[in-house]
Amino acid sequence: MLEKDINVTLIDDKTVQAKTDIVVIPAYLSKGLEFDAVIVYNDPDSKYKRDEKNLLYVACTRAQHELYIYN
C-alpha cells in the first residue's frame, strides 16, 4: 500500500540489497541492525505467542535517534 505514495522497499529473508532509503522490515529480521528512525505498529489486541513475546522489544531497540510507536 505504501509503494503507491512513496519510494519504499519491503525487506524479506530473500532480500540482498535495499534499493531505497525507506525500508519496511519485520521485527524478526531486524535483530542486530540499527536504523536512524524506526516506526513500529503494535496492535494492542494481538496476543503474542511465547516465542514472539520479545519482538516488540527487538523492534523498539533498533532505533538510534527516533522511535515512533503506533498502537
Image: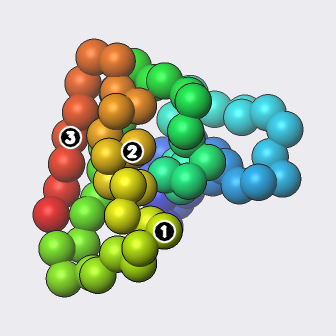
Percent coordinates x, y for residue 60 in the rendering:
31, 40
Mark nearer the viewer, 1 or 3: 1
Horizontally, residue 67 falls left or right of residue 17, namely left
As rendered, which of 57 and 21 lies closer to the eye?
57
Percent coordinates x, y for residue 14 in the rendering:
84, 53
Q: CA distance from mark 1 to mark 3?
A: 24 Å
**Which amino acid, mark 1?**
Asp
Query: Is there a contact, CB below 8 Å, between mark 1 and mark 2?
Result: no
Q: Can residue 8 be seen in this snapshot? A: no
Query: Is there a contact, CB below 8 Å, between mark 1 and mark 3?
Result: no
- Dot 2 corresponds to which residue? 59
Q: Secondary structure at mark 2?
A: helix
Q: Secondary structure at mark 1?
A: helix
Horizontally, residue 50 falls left or right of residue 20, namely left
Horizontally, residue 20 falls left or right of residue 27, namely right
**Which amino acid, mark 2?**
Ala
Percent coordinates x, y for residue 48 in the rendering:
35, 75
Marks 1 and 3, the one that precedes in the sequence: 1
Q: CA distance from mark 3 to mark 2?
A: 11 Å
**Which amino acid, mark 3?**
Tyr
Q: Can residue 65 be seen in this snapshot? A: yes
Query: Is there a contact, CB below 8 Å, between mark 3 and mark 2?
Result: no
**Which of the 4 quarters of the picture holds residue 19?**
top right
> Which quadrant: the C terminus?
bottom left
Q: Is residue 2 above or below residue 20?
A: below
Q: Secondary structure at mark 3?
A: strand
Please give the label number shown on residue 18: none
Please give the label number shown on residue 51: 1
